[in-house]
Amino acid sequence: MKACIFDLDGVLVDTAKYHFIAWRRLANELGVDFNEHDNEQLKGLSRDASLDVILKKGGVSATLEQRTEWMFNKNEWYLELVHQMNSDEVLPNTKELLADLKANGCKIALGSASKNAVLILERVDIYKYFDAIIDGTKTSKSKPDPEVFLLGAESLGCKPEECIVFEDAISGVQAAKTGGFYAIGIGSEDVLTQADIVFPSLEGLSFEKLNQIKF
Ligand code: B16
Ligand code: MG
């Protein structure tokens, strides 16, 4: 194991709750009901693909201009919440694991669909741990396409088989496996069935423990 590539939302931070508030506000303005279950379907999807899901649910059609305006509004509401984030909002053991990996010479990259990834990493004070950041501003294909992780490995100068990908979304695990990576699912074994191994969270993980895993 030479490198670790981390998804952001659902692995390092829980921004899904803020996406939910902002998408629900937009959906309700459009007369579409939007609940926590609907929000689950959006995890790991790009902003554009998330809007598609909501419009399809409500049977709402839209022009390109309307789509652009609605995504802009949703993002503004989301950013209001992101700007209030602080370092307490990293998920348990995140900082400890990143510091431990770094101290042991393991390269670290981010592989996220979010176009707000850098801001979020800075808000929660973990930006400094990353050797490469691949986010929604650098990719043209959404997960389950492996592009985001392949770019991450390339930026670190590593081959996919030398990297572990940490993902909480089904589409993200699929992206990692299609790209030839070892995939650690973060969440439930019943959901992340394609992952090589699943942990409920990053808690309990360390460089030593990861090195004991048989690739
Ligand atoms: P933004 P990840 C994803 O982050 C979220 O899980 C997903 O819900 C969101 O729509 C997507 O980022 C795009 O986010 O609107 O900030 O560009 O899990 O890939 O880190
Ligand atoms: Mg995620």
Image: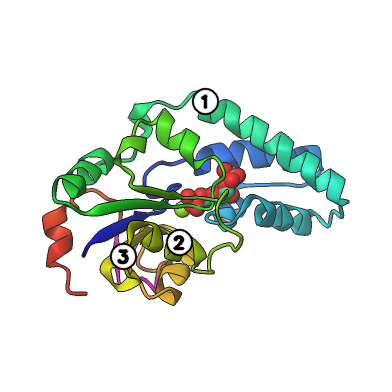
The residue wearing badge 3 is 158
Residue 90 x %, y %: 35, 36
Visible residue check, residue 140: yes
Position of 106 compared to 128: left or right? left
State if disc 3 and disc 1 touch (CB < 8 Å): no
Give whichever of 73, 92 is nearer the camera: 73
Asked whether 188 or 68 is in front, the reply is 68
The quadrant in which the N terminus is found is bottom left
- The residue tagged 1 is 83
Residue type beneath disc 3: Cys
Is ligand 1 within 8 Å of the beta carbon of the residue shown at mark 1? no
Choose top left, top right, bottom left or bottom right for residue 215.
Answer: bottom left
Report whether residue 25 is seen: no
In the visual, does 63 lie left or right of 159?
right
Residue 143 falls in which quadrant of the image? bottom right
Residue 65 in which image quadrant: top right
Write down the region rendered in magenta: 193-199
**Mark 1 is on which residue type?**
His
Q: How far apart are marks 3 and 2 (CA)?
A: 10 Å
Residue 189: percent from left, percent from top: 35, 67
What residue is at 17 percent from the left and 68 percent from the top?
Answer: 213
Residue under label 2, please give it: 151
Type of amino acid at the residue the image marks with label 2 = Leu
Answer few, some or many: residues within 10 Å of disc 2's Cα (few below 14, many 20 plus, some between 14 and 19). many
Foreground pick, 102 / 30: 102
Residue at mark 1 to residue at mark 3: CA–CA distance: 34 Å
197 within the magenta span: yes
Figure colour scheme: rainbow
